[in-house]
Every structure is written in structure tokens, then in C-alpha cells.
Amino acid sequence: MSPTPAPTPLPPASRPRRALATGCEMIARAAMDVGCRYFAGYPITPASQIFEVMTRELPERGGLASSAPDEISALAWCLGASIRGVPSMTATSGPGWALMVESVGYAVMTETPVVIAMVQRLGPSTGAATGGAQGDVGMVSQAVSGGYTIPVLAASTAQEAYEETLRAFEIAERLRTPVVLLADKEVASTTEVVEPDRLPAPPALLRPTFSGPGTYRPYAFGAPGEVPAFAPAGGPHKVTVTGSAHDFDGHLRKDDPEVLAVLRHLEQKIAGAEASLGRLDLDGAGADTLVLSFGVSSRASREAVAQARAEGRAVAMGNLRTLFPVPRTALVAALDGVRRVVVVEENMGGQYAQVLAPLLGDRQLVRVNGLGKLIAPAEIRHGIG
Amino acid sequence: MASAEILPLLRGELPYCKGCGHGQAARALSQALEATGLPTEQLCLVSDIGCVGLIDALLPTLHTVHTTHGRSTAFAQGLHMADAVLHGGRTKVIVVIGDGGATIGLLHLVAAAQANVDVTVVLHNNHLYGMTGGQGSGMTPADWITTTTRGGNPFPPLDMMGILRASGATHLGRYVATDPRLPEHLRAAIEHPGFACVEVLELCTAFGVKFNAMNARKLKDLAELTGQPLGELATPARPSFAEAWRQHAPAPAPPRPFQPIAPTGTAALDRPLRLVVAGTAGEGVQTAASLLAQAAVGQGLFATRKNDNLVTQGSGYSLSEVVLSPEVVHFTGIGVPDLVIATSQDGLKRTAKAVAAMGAGGLVIVDEGLDGLPGTAARVLRLPLRKLAGARSAALAGLALALKETGAFAPAHLLAQARTSLGEGGAAAVSAVEAWVGA
């Protein structure tokens, strides 16, 4: 076998246009491109750059950006703006998310669209501001009292950060839900090559909206899982918004079957959309080993998979772009014929592996985890076996 | 209930205890809203938790937003700001909270006052938590008995109007719920174009009256005694949020395009080069690394760059980790670097461990004046980086030399990038580096 020729850069004439950008810059750019018109933030490493770009550029593009006195206010301001009908976003990290949780639940209950870029850093409490981690999977997925699913998306490159921000807004508006873009310090803060001509066109934001005739019923839906039509507070149709358990009209009720129907519906509209929300970028088919990862750890996983393949191992690579609702449909297809699943994530013990375990049947589950440092390709290669 | 005919906005039977100030305040608010003549579709009532939070169901023709405890002012502020800037400012936003919500959401009140948003807060102060059983609040008067201050409240009550005046509110007033002119006062607050707060003093008949032998007259006296007098408080006039935004918002501009990097040729580098450049904050280390990444992309390479520095930003070490590769860079970790450049003592200290671990294929470029270089198998070049290029361009000099030594691509491309990006201020240093590396 002849040795593999050394890689060489593409000659200038055949190179796509390339620029350098961080994940944060791509998140902010995507938000503005897709139609975010309100941003409120409070600085926090490693999410501050999103806040900086949005405050600098969103007003130029006809939107509004605010500096909030804390993260509680930041998300509450966003929800107020969204209740007025304006696509809204905030960005934070673990400590700020902790303050926002109350309003995340409010957004679920009131079916108010909002996008939260949650850029993970290391450790509990203040943790290590400039340390990378993927330890907040459980924190964001279990944040809402009652156990409600909020869509959680992930990105492993600056380019994906752009794409997933577009998708976060599209989902938030269409399903009237908070959506978390679960980024991490490495992807958010690292400057890398992006190819502007390979970015997807922003989708239309289609918040289902009431236009009459008849009386507006703010929380009325037909079939379970159907998203109720929105009307803005301040518009021509009288709006009743409430974070209390309510009926189709938004009235506080006790022991009313309609209230329970609403409470079930809030979960059904997300869980029922699993197949369309699920995104798993699968590379390789017919392999007996599948490496599953997301965010920064997908990057090292790709190298490990390439190395294993070069050594003759049949390995597939799955980069999870939707973490929640768990993309069952895509995973079940990807798991066909697979005997060994290697789940790679930079946290202790494997938070997402724990979520995946019930789907794996009798397949072998290998966890590759790390704390306080990037998981290296060699560690993953070892896990592949 | 008769009120439905007299007060078309207020509907249904009031759910409050007999004699509770909430009922009086609700009637006054309804009258005030009617007196403004604003159509209900332009009125938005934001409320939250407690007996006072039942108000949204009583004013069912308004837009109502019932929120979490204490947060109504924050939701109202977001709603108003979006309305004012993006929807022409057609909506009047009114917040109804109690003394409990005022302390939970104290910062929201302060922020709304500071921004002077056109939001009117009606603060129903019944001096304790009624709905949950008469516990003391932050606005309970000193010595009052509540279910949580059996021996009398040891603290004076918060002066919420004082706090809001100091925060920049532009319309403030304090009145008892029984004041026959309360509707006018509320109307004035609602019509005021900036932040307004009206504190309505009330008595909780279930707990406040029971434990403290209070009545309306005593309530008035108490206000005077505690140094929180009734009436409108003097506040300075200043621009509302909407006016201030109009004054400060940037001119409209098209989306900022990407700045693609023009191809300058094709690098010779045929495998990843993982490098660390380290120095002292404020000495252009991260800028030099950024220029390197840009030049590399011009040469057809892929590049990743990560910065690190002390939390203080402007002191101590500053470094960048850069990976250059002819192929897409997936893993951005450096591990044992191929190349280390240290331009200052801070930078060398930070990279010493990596330098010690480097093998025979590695290259270390350090300023000649530095002490403490660890033993290493890597090739070491001790050079007058700082003397030659100045402290602020030492990293650039080190990188230019590294390009020459590794043959990754011609240093001229880095220096051309530096010349363009640094402008006149960096021209002399760039020329010095150019002459030195023979670019």
C-alpha cells in the first residue's frame, strides 16, 4: 500500500470564500439574520461576546438590545418583548441560567417563544469562568417544574452554531416554546474558519398567530400537540397571559379537566414533534460501533473515528444537533446493526449517556468523559476499542 | 355588584375581604383607566402573586399578563421597551403588585425607574403578606405584630418611594386607599410618560388590623410618623426611555457582511502545526495570533485560535493557542505544542511546563532577556524580540521568525496582514520585523 499523500491546501481558485469567526459571533449573526428583534443580556464569560455583538449591531438593524441589571431581568425582559410579539433572545452561562430558571418555566407555561444561548463553563456555582465543560445537560433539561421538555440544541463548530441558532428561533416561534442552544466555551470562544457561502438561508419565523374572526382564546388548541394561536398583548385582540394553571381562555382554574388537558398539551407539543426536531448528523453506515457526541467533544470524536477507520475499524460517527427532545427516531435508525455505542461528553459520568442508556437495549455502552480539559482523540480511540 | 354599572372596566364581584384596601384600590384604578379614555386594547395590566394579583380577572377587557412573584415590573419593562421602539409606543403598561412583590422584584423596580420606562406601578402596600397568613414583609412598620414577628417587628419599613426616587423615578406618590382623590392620582401617574409608582397604603383586615389595632386614621398617622409622608413626591424631569433611546440609538445600517480573507497563495504546511504564543497582557500577543490566523487562511490553511489571560484582562500573562492545518481542524487542543513563542517573563512562566514536555521536533522561540527557561529537547532560539520590535510587537516578530523556521508559509504574508490591520501605528515595528527576518 502506498503511503497517503500529504494533504495540501486547495489552490486559491477553487477555495470557497472563508472568514474567521467565533461561535458567539455566529450565534449573534444568525439571530439577527433570522429575525431576532430583541435581545437582553448580562455579561458572563463565555457568553459575553453574543451580548456585545447584539448590543452593537441589533439596533443598527432596526432591533432593540438592552443591558439588564441581572439575568433574572434579562430573561423576563425578553419574555415581555415576546409577549408583545417580538422574537427575542438572551445568552448566558451556568450561573446566569440558574437565575433564569423561574422564567424558563413561565415561558413554558405561557407558551412564549424565546431563545436562550447557554454557553457552558466549568463547575458548579461560579465555577471556572474560562474553563470549558459540557456539564449542564442535566441542568437545562430538567429545569422546569413538572418535568417539561424544552428543545435543547447543540453545535460543534462555529458554522453549526449559526445553523442551530436559526433552527432555535424557527422552533421557538413555531412551537411557542423556550429553546436552549446549549453551546460550550470551546465552540463559543474559539475563532475558526467559516464559509459564508455554505450557510443556509434563514428560515421564515412562523409563530402561529390569531387573525380572527371571533373571540381570541389564548390557549385553545384542537388536536393534542397543536400549538395555540398567538396574539400580541397590545394588539387588537384581548390577550390573557398567565403562568398559573389555566384553561383555554387563560383563566385560573382548579379541578378542571381543561386545565389538565393544557398541562398535558405543553409536553405533547414538544415530545410529539420529536421526529421533526431531532437532528443527528450521521457519518458512516453499517458499522458495529457508533460514536455519539455533541458540541466540542464531537470535534475530537471525528478525529478518533477517522483514526479508527484508518486502522480498519468500522465506526460510525453521530454528531447530535438535537439533545432534547431525545431524537429517538434518528437514534433508532442509527443504532441498527450497532453493538457498541461510545458516548463522548466533557462532564463527569456521562449526563447524556444516562439519557441514551434506555434506548440502547443490550448494546454495550462505553462512556468517554473528562473534566477540566478537552477530551483528546486518543481517549476516544481507546473507547472505540 | 353595583360597581359593574358604575365602573365598566371592573367586572364581577370583588373577591377581597370586607374593608380590604385592595378593593378600594381596584375601584380607583378602574376609574383612573376609564378617565384616560384609552381604548382597552392599548392597556396592558401586568400583575403577579398574592391577593392583589387577582386583579387581572377583575379587569377582563384589558390585556392582562399574570406573572411570577415580583417579576411583573420586569415583564412590563420588556413589553414596554419592545412596544415603544418596535411598535410605535401605542400600549400603556400598568403593573399591580403588593409589598411582597416589591421586595422580591426590588431590582426590577429600580431598573424600571432608572430607565424611566413608561410603566406605572401601583404598589398595594398592606404592610404584610396577607394571602399566606399574615407574615411580616420588608414594608412592615417597626414594632408591628405579624405572625412572624410576634414580639414586634425589629426593623423599620423600607421606604420604597425613597428608593425609587433615588433610582430616577419621574413620578411618585403615596396615598391611603381610602383617599377619595386616589383615582385622579392614579390617572396622573398613568398619563405620565415615564416611570411612575403610586404606593397605596392599605390595611389587611385579616391580619394587620387584628394584631395591631389599626384603622384608616392611624394608618395616615403612621405614614407621617415613619417619615414616609403622604402625597406626591418631588421628582426631577428627564427623558423617558423612548426619548432616550431615540437620542442614543445608532443610525440604521445594513447587516455587517462577513469579511472573507482574500487568498494570497498556498502554504507549504502539510500537517497540523500546534503552537502557543505567550506574553504579557497589553503587549499585542493575541492580536499577533489573530494576524497569524488570518494570514494562514489567506494561504489556504485552516486555523483555530483560542485566547487565555487572567480574569483581570489587563495584567499578567496573555496567550493564544493556534492550530494551523491544511485540513479542517477538528480537535483544537494543543497537548504538547510543536512551537512555543514566549515574549515576556509572564508568558514563559505560563508555557514552561509545555516547553519542558516538547520533543526534538519542537521549536521554542524566547526573548533573550528571559530567565527560567526549563530544560527541553526542543530546539531553542533566544532572540532579541523585544529589543528588535518593541514590547508590543515582540509576538509578531516571534511568529514571523517561526514561519520562516518551520517553512509553514512565507512570513511576508503575516507581515502584509499586520501592515494592513495595524495601520500607521504598527508600520515601524512591522518594517523592523521585516528587515530582521528578511521577508
Image (cartoon, rainbow, N blue to C red):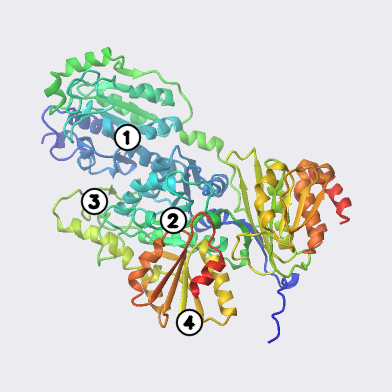
Residue A325 visible here: no
Q: Secondary structure at mark 3?
A: loop
The local crowd at label 1, few if under 14, some if 14 to 19, many if 20 or more residues have their Cα within 10 Å, is some
Q: Which of B177/A6 is in front?
A: A6
Name which residue lies at 33% across and 76% down.
A361
Name which residue lies at 66% across and 45% down.
B318
Name which residue lies at 77% across and 45% down.
B393
Q: Are marks 3 and 4 in contact (CB under 8 Å)?
A: no
Which of the chains bears the disc numbered 3? A
Q: Are marks 1 and 4 in contact (CB under 8 Å)?
A: no
Q: Which of B240/A115 is in front?
A: A115
Q: Are marks 3 and 1 in contact (CB under 8 Å)?
A: no
Mark seen at residue B218: none
Which of the chains bears the disc numbered 4? A
Q: Earlier in the sequence, mark 2 or mark 4?
A: 2
Say whether mark 4 and mark 2 are on the same chain. Answer: yes
Say whether mark 1 and mark 3 are on the same chain. Answer: no
Residue at which label 3 appears? A250
Residue at which label 2 appears? A135
Q: Secondary structure at mark 1?
A: helix
The residues tagged by marks 2 and 4 sit, at their Cα atoms, a distance apart of: 29 Å
In screen coordinates, is A46 left or right of B53? right
Q: Which of A164/A232 is in front?
A: A164
Name which residue type carries label 1. Ile
Which of the chains bears the disc numbered 2? A
Q: Quadrant of residue B80?
A: top left
- Please determine whether, in this image, residue A208 is positioned above or below residue B374: below
Say whether mark 4 and mark 1 are on the same chain. Answer: no
Name which residue type carries label 4. Ala
Residue at which label 4 appears? A287
Q: Position of residue A274 (x, y in %)?
A: 36, 69
Residue at which label 1 appears? B104
